[in-house]
Amino acid sequence: MNSSESLGSSDHTVFMALVPVLVQCFGLIILGFVAGQFKLLTGAQVKGLGVYVTTFALPAIFFTVMVTIDFSDVDWNVVLAVSLGKLAIFLFSMGIVLVISRGRSIGLAGILAIFTSQSNDVALAYPVLRLLYPDLASYIYLFAPAQLVILNPFAYFALEWHRTQEKAAVHSVFRHVISNPLFFMTAIGVFFNFLLKHKLPSIVEGFFKDLGASFSATALFYLGFSMVGKLSAIDRRGVYTLVFILIGKVLISPFITREIAVLLLAHQPLNSSVPKSSFAFLYAAAPTAPPVFLFSAKFGIIPEVVRVPSASALSVHACTAADTRSAS
């Protein structure tokens, strides 16, 4: 009886700690939606916010993470499982789109590959997972570099090819990919990680910390603003794409990642492997990162469709977190 009461109390504590995180995310999205609905800001002004987020705030976060990552005491099987799960859903999404479109929708393939494989690590996944799995939450900072350095460049290439296909200039595509702020700052961060021994100098630490802190609120506000009037613009093709996105992100990706984690952690005791595989499942089910919506708008690839699943995925992630906690 005491054990049951203790578990119930623990679940209640986690739930009460989870509520502010969800209120923060939904609140910022709703605030942006209200601002757009009542035309408190112009489209040009909000577009500037999008440029700020993708060019300055988000690269600052990943630069900081890449510089300060410490590789000690890490279960690399968990990192490998999540990375392989990302790779599987990335290739699956890109391959399905290219096959169905017969190679014509390269930009769409890039957007959907990022959407289904990338999670909102900093703004949402970390606060939620820190409550449920405090010993594993810091692992998300190891997942992001693999996504940025290995997978995303292929998607960036597809997006840049989509934009420059009329010129058919391969060198132009490579130039845009290499100069992408996320790609560039990640590569620079890896270099300084070894040079500075996992620690940012105090003289610049505050600068990058404040710059990165502005990312979450600005990106979620932009997302909410961008959703105004978009639902009515979705055609039949958009509905099919929307269904594919939700199935890939909410169902296929988490289960693939969990099964890979179970296989790689089979040699570990159940009291260690089960939490880790559940952690991998919940991480993969996290909503995608706001930059996907920003890239979609920037390259003009079904932005009205890509923005819609965010709220749905966020809701599913909240419910999944509660169910996972109850089952543990």
Image: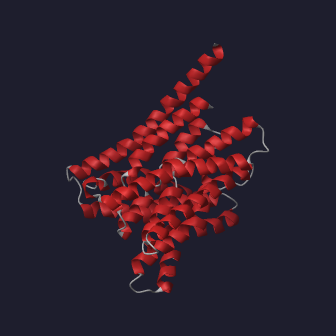
Provide residue 240's location: percent of width, then percent of height. Answer: 38, 57
Judged from this view, the residue extending furthest toward the right is 267
Q: State left or right for residue 75 relative to residue 210.
A: right
Q: How is the image coloured?
A: secondary structure
Whether residue 204 is visible here, answered yes or no, is: no
* Residue 261: percent from left, percent from top: 68, 48
Q: Nearer the viewer, residue 157 or 222?
A: 157
Quarter placement of the N terminus: top right
Q: In the drawing, does residue 69 fall left or right of residue 104?
A: right
Identity of the residue furthest to the top in this view: 1
Label total for image = 0
* Image quadrant containing the C terminus: top right
Residue 143 visible in image: yes
State the residue at coordinates (70%, 46%). 262
Q: Residue furthest left?
A: 38
Indicate the quadrant where residue 238 lies. Answer: bottom left
Residue 29 lies, in percent from the top left, at: 35, 47
Q: Residue 120 in the image: x percent, y percent? A: 50, 51
- Of 46 and 292, the residue lying toward us: 292
Instruction: Judge by depth and name the residue closer to the eye, 166 or 5.
Output: 166
Residue 80, compared with residue 34, is above or below; it is below
Q: Nearer the viewer, residue 287 or 136?
A: 287
